[in-house]
Every structure is written in C-alpha cells, then in structure tokens.
Amino acid sequence: MNHLKLTSTIAALALGTVLILTTAPKASADERGRCQQRVERAEEHYRHEVHEHGKHSRQAENARAKMNATWDRCWNEAHAWYDPQRHEWRTERDWDRSYDWDRDRNRDHDRDDR
C-alpha cells in the first residue's frame, strides 16, 4: 500500500512539473507582449508631450516618469525591459543609462527654445 502511494505521489509530481514547465513560456510571452504594448504607448505619449510642450515641460517630465514606471513594472513582471528605439528586449536593468531621450530631437521639434 505504501509503495502505491509513493508511486502515485511521484507520478503526480512529475505531471505537475511537466505542466508548469510547458505553461511558463507562454505566460512569460504574454507578460512581455503586454509590457511591450505599455512601453510603446508610454513612449508615444512622451514624444507627444515633448512635441506639444517641450522637453523640460511638466507634461513631458510626467510622461517620462510614467515611462520609467512602465519599465520598472515590466522588469518586475518579465525580468526584462523593452527598448522601443531598438525594438528589442534588454536583460540588464539599465534603461536609465541606455534609453536615448534625445533621439528624436529634430523630428519632435523640441520647443525648449521658446
């Protein structure tokens, strides 16, 4: 009887392990997809605020803070962050050093000169 319980327990653990390992990548992909969409929306909002109000405006600073918070949330959920400029996932928590906030300076017609 004990041998049967041990065999059943081992079989249940093996099945549970297989199920966890096969569903984890899908969950991770879903998390990354949602994070990527949030980052792209946050970046679009930031670019809009820079274009409308200038890079150092309160609106642009708020949008920049929201983008940083979005990256932080993605980092906590997916252990990576999406770089919308390079269109790639990064695995080092370095968005504060790697993201080029001035990349689109000419295209966005930065209004700081007013």
Image (tube, rainbow, N blue to C red):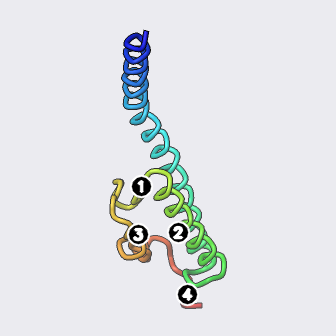
Examine the rendered structure and indicate whether residue 54 appears above or below residue 6: below
Q: Nearer the viewer, residue 59 or 18?
A: 18
Q: For marks 3 and 4, give the one nearer the viewer.
A: 3
Q: Quadrant of residue 28?
A: top left
Q: Which residue is mark 2?
A: 68
Mark-to-mark CA distance, 3 and 2? 8 Å
Q: Which residue is mark 4?
A: 112
Of the numbered discs 4 and 2, the one sitting upstream in the chain is: 2
Of the numbered discs 3 and 4, the one sitting upstream in the chain is: 3
Which amino acid is tagged 2? Asn
* Location of residue 61 in the rendering, given as x and y in whole percent from the top left corner: 60, 78
Q: Are marks 3 and 1 in contact (CB under 8 Å)?
A: no
Q: Quadrant of the N terminus?
A: top left
Residue 79 numbered mark, or none = 1
How many C-alpha atoms fall within 10 Å of the one at disc 2: few (<14), some, or many (≥20)? some
* Location of residue 94 in the rendering, given as x and y in whole percent from the top left corner: 37, 70
* Location of residue 31 in the rendering, given as x and y in whole percent from the top left corner: 49, 44
Q: Are marks 3 and 2 in contact (CB under 8 Å)?
A: yes
Q: Tell me, yes or no, if residue 78 can be seen here.
A: yes
Q: Which residue is mark 3?
A: 95
Q: Tell me, yes or no, if residue 47 can be seen here.
A: no
> Which residue corresponds to the image point at 63% horizontal and 78% vertical from the top-left?
53
Of the numbered discs 1 and 4, the one sitting upstream in the chain is: 1
Q: For marks 1 and 2, give the one nearer the viewer.
A: 1
Q: Quadrant of the C terminus?
A: bottom right
